[in-house]
Image (cartoon, helix red, strand yellow):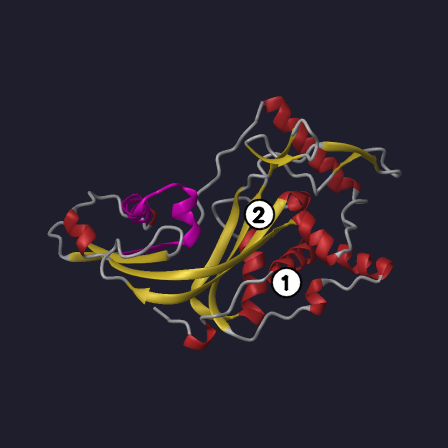
């Protein structure tokens, strides 16, 4: 396995890397949008201002989507008469954060917090130059993750992107020699196959550092799940566990939602806000979900 150069171990994922991924995907799905926005408003997109650092590092780009479209507000497009969604109000009923007022009754207001489900995640465990790999995996994870349909333009306001840079690789003493919430792990093992057991089938898989914590797994539960992810369907014995080669690593991760991207890169003006087809698609999706009675979608397991 390729290792990361020691001098790159301290590199950190940044919000600029995330806005860069949004820029790349927006330009891919609707090239004229960014160009028109820049021409009309004098705004230069992050992709033309920002260049990822010239370092080599393993990385993953993760796209997540709010399970439900945001509530519709009373803002109406003058050209279409269609009520437009507020991309900055992507919420669900599953989690709330509370804020206390400063009045004598100590009244509590609740602000629903967004919950996202996995929409695509692809990366590499081999060090790659970020200048080229970040845009490559922004597109690949959005459009070519075979577990999902390609992300479409009307989904953009519902998305959040995360950039994970993998650093500090260390060989583990055994498959439990790592800390939940701190380390990601890579496992490699083999198993006999064939009529006489003379052939060896090789397996490998990885979970990013946040997966075990998000799934509320302990170390053993994580290893068992990772073995299945690797494609092994036989009995998991103590002998199999003892021969697993395990490498732990850490990640620097940053993620931003679409409305944060708009605030950062477009001065708060959504370049898609006047796209009638996009608005209609979001409205249709919300109506369809209400008709189907979809209230919650269980988050998928990340890489």
Q: Position of residue 267 (x, y in %)?
A: 78, 55
- The residue at 65%/56% (across/down) is 22
- The residue at 48%/34% (across/down) is 298
Image quadrant of residue 111?
top right
Q: Is residue 198 magenta?
A: no
Q: Position of residue 102 (x, y in %)?
A: 69, 35
Residue at the right extreme? Answer: 78
Q: Position of residue 252 (x, y in %)?
A: 49, 61
Residue at the front extreme? Answer: 104
57 to 69, vertically: above or below: below
Q: In the visual, does 258 lie left or right of 219?
A: right
Q: In the visual, does 79 lie left or right of 290?
A: right
Q: Which mark is residue 295?
A: none
Q: Rounded to the nearest whole Å, what is the CA distance between mark 1 and mark 2? A: 24 Å
41 to 213, vertically: above or below: below
Q: Nearer the viewer, mark 1 or mark 2?
A: 1
Image quadrant of residue 245?
bottom left
Q: Is residue 204 magenta?
A: yes
Instruction: Tally the marks.
Output: 2
- As helix, strand or loop, the secondary structure at mark 1 comes to helix
For the question of whether residue 150 can be seen, the reply is yes
In terms of depth relative to the viewer, which is nearer, 205 or 233? 205
Q: Which residue is mark 1?
A: 16
Image quadrant of residue 167?
bottom left
The image quadrant where one finds the N terminus is: bottom left
Q: Position of residue 32 (x, y in %)?
A: 77, 56
Which is more N-terminal, label 2 or label 1?
1
- As helix, strand or loop, the secondary structure at mark 2 comes to loop
Q: Identify the magenta region.
A: 203-228
Q: Which secondary structure dominates the residues rendered in magenta? A: helix
Mark 1 packing: few (<14 Cα in 10 Å), some, or many (20+)? many
């Amino acid at each position: 396995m390729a290792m990361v150069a020691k001098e790159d171990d301290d590199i950190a994922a940044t919000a600029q890397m995330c806005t860069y991924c949004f820029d790349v995907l927006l330009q891919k799905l609707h090239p004229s949008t960014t160009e028109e926005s820049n021409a009309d408003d004098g705004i230069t997109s992050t992709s033309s201002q920002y260049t990822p650092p010239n370092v080599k590092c393993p990385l993953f780009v993760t796209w997540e989507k709010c399970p439900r479209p945001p509530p519709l507000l009373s803002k109406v497009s003058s050209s279409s008469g269609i009520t437009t969604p507020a991309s900055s109000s992507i919420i669900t009923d599953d989690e709330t954060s509370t804020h206390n007022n400063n009045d004598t009754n100590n009244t509590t207001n609740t602000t629903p917090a967004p919950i996202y489900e996995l929409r695509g995640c692809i990366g590499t465990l081999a060090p790659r130059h970020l200048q080229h790999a970040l845009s490559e995996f922004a597109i690949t994870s959005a459009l070519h993750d075979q577990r999902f349909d390609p992300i479409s333009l009307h989904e953009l306001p519902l998305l959040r992107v995360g950039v994970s840079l993998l650093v500090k690789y260390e060989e583990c003493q055994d498959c439990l020699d790592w800390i939940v919430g701190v380390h990601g792990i890579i496992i490699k093992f083999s198993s006999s196959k064939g009529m006489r057991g003379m052939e060896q089938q090789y397996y490998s898989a990885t979970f990013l550092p946040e997966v075990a914590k998000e799934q509320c797994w302990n170390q053993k539960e994580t290893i068992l799940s990772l073995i299945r992810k690797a494609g092994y369907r036989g009995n998991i014995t103590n002998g199999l566990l003892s021969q697993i080669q395990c490498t732990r690593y850490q990640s620097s991760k940053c993620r931003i939602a679409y409305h944060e991207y708009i605030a950062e890169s477009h001065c708060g003006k959504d370049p898609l806000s006047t796209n009638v087809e996009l608005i209609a698609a979001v409205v249709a999706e919300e109506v369809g979900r209400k008709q189907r009675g979809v209230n919650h979608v269980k988050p998928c397991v990340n890489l």
